[in-house]
């Protein structure tokens, strides 16, 4: 029951937001939004909740390349 409540709350939130932007959506569009949220939602939430205060930023970061190994930083 709690999962069903979260789903209906999310559905109302998304629908209201799209209506505010004057975007018309049907069930196919909402299904895609729900699928994307199911796929990316949990990892994004984990990132938001991660405790990153003690981590030093990488010096000379180049976002066009993967992170360097710790010994090369």
Image: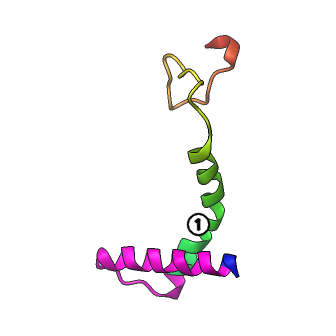
State the residue lying farthest toward the front.
Answer: 2
Instruction: Locate residue 53, reporting x and y percent.
Output: 56, 29
Q: Nearer the viewer, residue 73 or 41?
A: 41
Q: Quadrant for the N terminus, please.
A: bottom right
The location of residue 11, given as percent across then percent down, is 52, 79
On screen, 73 above or below 61?
Answer: above
Q: Which residue is mark 1?
A: 36
Determine whether 58 is above or below 33 in the image. above
The local secondary structure at tag 1 comes to helix
> Which picture quadrant has residue 17?
bottom left
Residue at the extreme bottom: 26
Q: With 62 as the anchor, is 6 left or right in this view?
A: right
Q: Tell me how many marks there are.
A: 1
- In which quarter of the view is residue 51 placed? top right
Q: Quadrant of the C terminus?
A: top right
Q: Nearer the viewer, residue 46 or 28?
A: 46
């Amino acid at each position: 029951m709690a999962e069903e409540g979260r789903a209906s709350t999310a559905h109302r939130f998304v629908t209201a937001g799209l209506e505010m932007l004057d975007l018309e959506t049907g069930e196919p569009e909402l299904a895609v939004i729900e699928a994307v949220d199911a796929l990316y939602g949990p990892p994004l939430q984990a990132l938001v909740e991660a405790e990153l205060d003690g981590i030093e930023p990488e010096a000379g970061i180049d976002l066009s390349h993967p992170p360097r190994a710790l010994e090369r930083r």
